[in-house]
Amino acid sequence: MVINRENENIFLCAKGNNEGYGVDVVIDAAGSTEMLKFALETVRPCGIIGKVSWGPKPIHYSLDNLLEKLLTLEGIFIHTWDV
């Protein structure tokens, strides 16, 4: 499933999958900390989050869902800000 956030509520679409458990896999290519939070909230238990990039902002929320849902977080660290 591909969700166009301009036409659809991405949270409701994602949570509506698998009888309300969420989607199997979330691939975050945006790189924002907000998208990781979205992924943690919408992926099903034992699901997978693929993080293609990471931004320069620190995370200011709990990662407890990662442990509570037995999630797999895979990714590559990439950044584009100037040094």
Image (cartoon, helix red, strand yellow):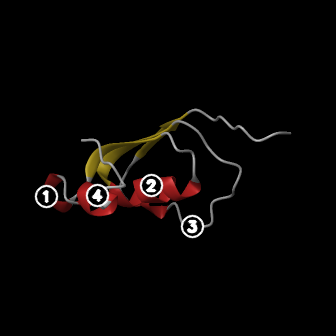
- For residue 16, side relative to residue 70 (left or right): left
Please state which amino acid type lies under the numbered disc 1: Glu
Please state which amino acid type lies under the numbered disc 4: Glu
Per the rendering, the mark at residue 61 is 3
Q: Which residue is mark 4?
A: 8
**Nearer mark to the viewer, of 1 and 4:** 4
Q: CA distance from mark 2 to mark 4?
A: 26 Å
Q: How many discs mark residues in the rendered view? A: 4
Residue 82 to residue 22: above or below? above
Snapshot quadrant of residue 24: top left
Front residue of 43 and 79: 79
Per the rendering, the mark at residue 66 is 2
Marks 4 & 3, CB-CB < 8 Å contact:
no
Please rate how many residues cluster around mark 2, counting C-alpha atoms within 10 Å: few if below 14, some from 14 to 19, many from 20. Answer: many
Quadrant of the rendering where the N terminus is positioned: top left
- Helix, strand or loop at label 3? It is loop
**Nearer mark to the viewer, of 3 and 2:** 3
- Helix, strand or loop at label 1? It is helix
Which tag, 3 or 2, sits closer to the chain's start?
A: 3
Please rate how many residues cluster around mark 3, counting C-alpha atoms within 10 Å: few if below 14, some from 14 to 19, many from 20. Answer: few
**Nearer mark to the viewer, of 4 and 3:** 4
Q: CA distance from mark 4 to mark 3?
A: 25 Å
- Helix, strand or loop at label 4? It is loop
Residue 23 to residue 38: above or below? above
**Residue appearing at x 27%, y 49% in the figure:** 23
Which tag, 4 or 3, sits closer to the chain's start?
A: 4
Residue 54 to residue 45: above or below? above
**Residue appearing at x 86%, y 39% in the figure:** 83
Please rate how many residues cluster around mark 4, counting C-alpha atoms within 10 Å: few if below 14, some from 14 to 19, many from 20. Answer: few
Q: Which residue is mark 1?
A: 19
